Amino acid sequence: MDVYLSMFGPVAHGESPDTTAQKLSESGANTLLFFTSLYHSYRLLQPRYPQRAIYSLETDRLFFPPDPAFYKESPLKPEMSRDFPDSRYFSRLIDACHARKISFSALVPMCAGDRLAPAFPELTVENLYGAHDRMFFCYNNPGVRAYRFAMIRDLLTHFPVDRLTLDKIPQTMLEQYSQTAIFDPPLRTVGSFCFCDSCRKAARKHDLDLDEVKARAREIAARSLHIPQHVITAQGEKLTGDTEIPLLLLEEPLLYRMLKFRMDTATELVREVRSIAAELRPGIPLQVAFVPPSHPGHDMTAPRAWLTVQSYKLYAPVVDEILAVVHFGPDVVRFETERAVAAVEGKTRVISSMRLYGATRPEEVPVLAEQALAGGSQGVSFLGYDVTTDELLAALGSWARNRRRG
Ligand SMILES: [Zn+2]
């Protein structure tokens, strides 16, 4: 049975690669999911690393030594971590994992980067008002594709990684709450679309006129903006759900076609990654990390699957595995796993990725794992090795050993 543990990196502070691999093994893990860079400077609490107990991740800096030759065609140039410029650490960690029969998955964030995005507005999502996003790149932009494709070629050419995981595959740029007020459901829908030149060009091939979509999107947005903010705010939690949106899409076929166009081009991006990976490393499994089908995602943008164009069903034929990232309690894990497994209809593997930090109690670890398996998950995944506690790692290890003993 697969047990994944993830690690933010850039290093396990103060721990040798061999010690890390040994501890992963003791925790029952047979796969390490390693973030090769982060799109946001999350501030982490790392109780197991007393020298670095409070640590902010570098943004858009690579935790492996990039080979500049791969990025000649890319408008974005790779930069290595400045914090721990041990260029051999990444290779040594892979080797240490392999020595203990732990497979190594390299995670690449695809369409987000909140250090690079503001510096290269021409590569980012452009909303219905022509404003550039400061975190999300447009996946239809050739420069964005060139950068990430180069990164994947670089990784697969120079390092013996066993799997590739894509994160932040097209994701909405619009969260549930702005800094000052709620985005109501129609506003959240039309506000998540990109109208940049690359999308405009791609849409023509899909017989979709983005000027027409933008004009209608603005009319719909205007209805939301017309309602006083204090009135919308007073609705509170009720407006964070999607109740109005199915009706909106039925009544506005143009918006439905826009969403479909976004889904089609997003899966096309993944298909292209798949062919690059297959060419360099035939048979290498391609994984993607998705928000749950029903609940909003746990991170700061609280994305939901269908607005982030993360349809489990549509991606099932183009990836080998979907990590359903459910950082909630056991009931939510069970519910979302069932939903995800049902959606893919056996066309790909689903593994539930759960929370081994924060609110998760040691006694809850086996319950989470069992609920994932009961829901049809083909293994379990936990985030993450470098932010958890010894207690939680021990709970996972003991569950995994018991499970494997049957
Ligand atoms: Zn675009």
Image: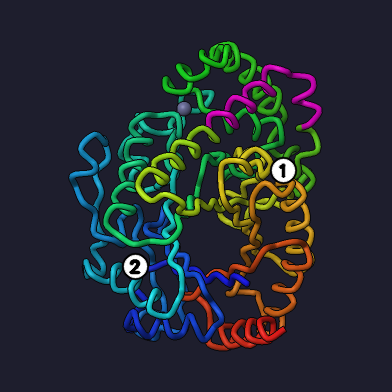
Q: Nearer the viewer, mark 2 or mark 1?
A: 2
Q: For residue 233, which numbered disc appears in the image? A: 1
Q: Quadrant of residue 216?
A: top right
Q: Secondary structure at mark 2?
A: loop
> Percent x, y for residue 117?
37, 41
> Percent x, y for residue 37?
37, 57
In this view, the residue in front, 226 or 151, is 151
Q: Residue furthest front?
A: 282
Q: Secondary structure at mark 1?
A: helix
Residue at x 65% of width, y 24% of height: 221
**Residue 1 sits inside the magenta stretch:** no
Residue at x 47% of width, y 65% of height: 33
Around disc 2, counting alpha carbons within 10 Å, would you say few (fewer than 14), some (14 to 19), or many (20 or more)? many
The magenta segment is 246-265
Judge left or right: residue 82 versus residue 180: left
Q: Is mark 1 within 8 Å of ligand 1?
A: no
